[in-house]
Amino acid sequence: MSVVASSSSATRYQSGRTGTTLKGRELDQCYSGPVDEHAYRHGDGTYVYPNPYFAYKGGYSNGAKQGRGKLTIGDGYLEGVFVDDEIQGEGFRVWADGSSFSGTFEKGEPAGTGAWEG
């Protein structure tokens, strides 16, 4: 598959129709999942970045992480509900050293109430 256009918030893919599942490479990044009528990632899919330490599996809407998902990053992972590409509300964060936070997140960062371990 080839890239149709890209922006900071979403990447569009060439596809035949709404709901098409794409498996292809886009600038050394790989997405597998459905797209909408504008060819944005939409629905449950998996996106693997060129750096093997980053991957996201979960919901998308209009090309952005949206809904329940898990983001694996270089020093651990975040799991919970994503809104506009960031974990928001209740979620779970684990760091490489085994420490963790379970609680409320705002714009991707632990905030408000929660429990720290480790």
Image (spheres, helix red, strand yellow):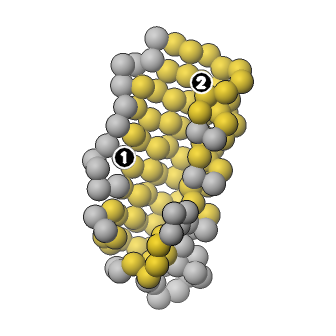
Identify the amino acid type marked 2. Ser
Mark 1 neighbour class, 10 Å CA radius: few under 14, some 14 to 19, many 20 or more: some
Q: Nearer the viewer, mark 1 or mark 2?
A: 1
How far apart, in angstroms, are the residues tagged by discs 1 and 2? 21 Å
Count the numbered circles shown. 2
Residue furthest to the bottom: 16
Helix, strand or loop status at disc 2: strand
Relative to 116, does residue 17 appear above or below in the rendering? below
Could you say which disc has been placed on residue 102 in the image?
2
Quadrant, the N terminus: bottom left
Mark 2 neighbour class, 10 Å CA radius: few under 14, some 14 to 19, many 20 or more: some
Residue that appears at 35% across and 55% down: 49
Q: Which residue is mark 1?
A: 54
Give x and y (percent) for residue 93.
Answer: 51, 29
Identify the amino acid type marked 1. Phe
Q: Nearer the viewer, residue 32 or 104?
A: 104
Give the side of residue 112 with respect to residue 65, left or right: right
Residue that appears at 54% across and 47% down: 69
